[in-house]
Image (cartoon, helix red, strand yellow):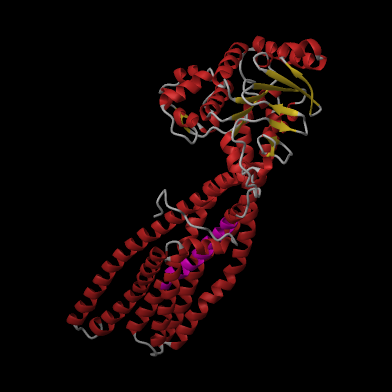
Amino acid sequence: MIDAYEDPGTPDRRGGARYLWWLVLRQPGRCAAGAVFGSVWMVLLAATPYLMSRAVDDGLEPGDMGALALWTGALFLVSGFNSWLSTMRHRTMTRVRMDANFRTVKVVVGQTVRLGASLERRAGAGEVVTIGVGDVQTIAGALTVVGPGVGAVVAYAVVAGLLLAVSPLLAVVVLLGVPVIGLVVGPLVGRLQGAETEYRERQGVLTARIGDLAGGLRVLSGLGGKNLVADAFRRDSGRLREQGYRVGAVTSWMEALAAGLPTLFLAGVTWIAARQAAQGHISVGELVSVYGYVAALVWPVMFLIECGHQLSRGVVAARRVTALLRLEPPADAATADPPAEPSVLEDPESGVRVLPGRLTALAAARPADALAVVDRLGRYAPSAVTWGGVRLDEIALARVRERILVADPEADLFAGPLREVVAGHGDPSDEDVLRALRAAAAADVVQGLPDGLDSVVSARGRSLSGGQRQRVRLARALLADPEVLLAVEPTSALDAHTEAMVADRLRAAREGRTTLLATTSPLVLDRADRVLFLADGKVVASGGHRELLDGEPGYRELVARDAARSAAEEVVG
């Protein structure tokens, strides 16, 4: 199977069927072995009736015990060998499916990393989750056609050849039987693809909504909107259930036909063979062999129908994967180098100037305006921002990401030990991790967990409170120690005492480094070297916190409103 650190290769993104074929080509030896094992296994299933017919015609009917023992022994050996082949076929196909599973996971994860911050704007979280949870398994199951599927075709041809030696009429009936079954099942495959596609789309939307509900349930309860959202979710889940019933209806017909049509086929061929035996056209042993051939043929026919079902679902799932793989991150033709030393970061659209080595606060009457400025300064939105006199969009994006870090208040916290959650992509020592946690006033988070830094944090930090999540995010940003840190509302979920502690420690931790904090907290604003007051997206005043309180009425009203809100929250808490 694919190694965890092995390059999965470059997938074929042109369509679902092409992607499945690419998965086969990535493991040609194993797929060929699965096809050989499956073919020989099914052919030997058909050989069993032949051996039985020889035992009847050469041994049982003339009373030749030696011939009977010979053919019976051969039957025993072939059956034992076929049991071993069945085991090897199953093992090989399990490896084929697991390789396809893991390879697809690596390809999808690699693509999401490649898209980076643009992923949220290009694909929904529910879409990615649905691919990882359901589509990957479906794609792996579709590779069943490589082993039993190929074996079914080979066994079908062999049985037709054996029947040709017994009776041309029976051979013609068998050769025409599967195409007729295909004509019956074919329309159902098309219906299944359409129903399955719509079902997967609805499932992706609903999965995304589940994630939103899980993350915002506490807020919804506080706003009194829980019942309203629950009703909407109930309606959407009801539509998904109805669509699932439609998929199930088509699937049930396919599975019923997979079990019923081969049986009817067996009955028809057996009736024709019995008529020919009664008329003396074939011997009793040949009649036994014909019954055995057709009974053995039930397996290949069932496999062919099942493979059509699995392949249809696999193509739908692979289309979703290839749709994600075709997404491209924003083009970056920039090649300029960033400033060699700390420099001014300036946004002409708003008039914001972030001075190097200083702690700057950005107070906006509308939070969306501050967030837009930070997006431009961090190069997450098109802009004319300059850094050291050079346009930011002319500097290679990778170099920008190395030196400018945007600490988003809703940045994801991945599941894992607290140590790894804070460490990010680096490998810092425990002392460095604890130092960053202390700087973010989050030492109590470590102390409150049963295993300290080894305690496992759930996905998105749901096992932590809102304030704990915010401080852990801040600790992660401080541990990264970027040259320029742009943080949005880093203390909005904290009480006044903790907020003041964070403000003091944050200033000390970022001493001599360029830092911009988008906030309206008076406790944080008071500790900034310089405050920029933003109104209608433009800087209308700048200076020290107390200076702006005295000289700028709009700023004074904004800060007073935030202070009153914080005091009310303290009383409620």
Magenta segment, principal secondary structure?
A: helix
Residue 199 pos. (x, y %): 63, 51
Q: Is residue 303 within the magenta segment? A: yes
Q: Which of 255 and 8 is in front in this view?
A: 8
Q: Can residue 4 be seen in this view?
A: yes
Q: Which residue lies furthest to the left in this view?
A: 66
Q: Is residue 549 within the magenta segment? A: no
Q: In this view, does 271 lie to the left or right of 198?
A: left
Q: In this view, does 30 lie to the left or right of 458?
A: left
> Which residue is painted at 74% across and 17% down in the image?
543
In the displayed structure, would residue 228 be above or below residue 3?
above
Residue 382 pos. (x, y %): 72, 41
In the displayed structure, would residue 346 be above or below residue 161?
above
Examine the image and state in which quarter residue 560 appears. top right
Residue 240 pos. (x, y %): 64, 46
Residue 56 pos. (x, y %): 28, 81
The quarter of the image holding the C terminus is: top right
Q: Nearer the viewer, residue 263 or 19?
A: 19
The quarter of the image holding the N terminus is: bottom left
In the displayed structure, would residue 39 be above or below residue 199?
below
Number of numbered labels in the structure image: 0
Magenta residues? Answer: 297-319
> Which residue is painted at 46% across and 56% down in the image?
100
Q: Which of 78 and 382 is in front in this view?
A: 382
Q: Can residue 442 be seen in this view?
A: no
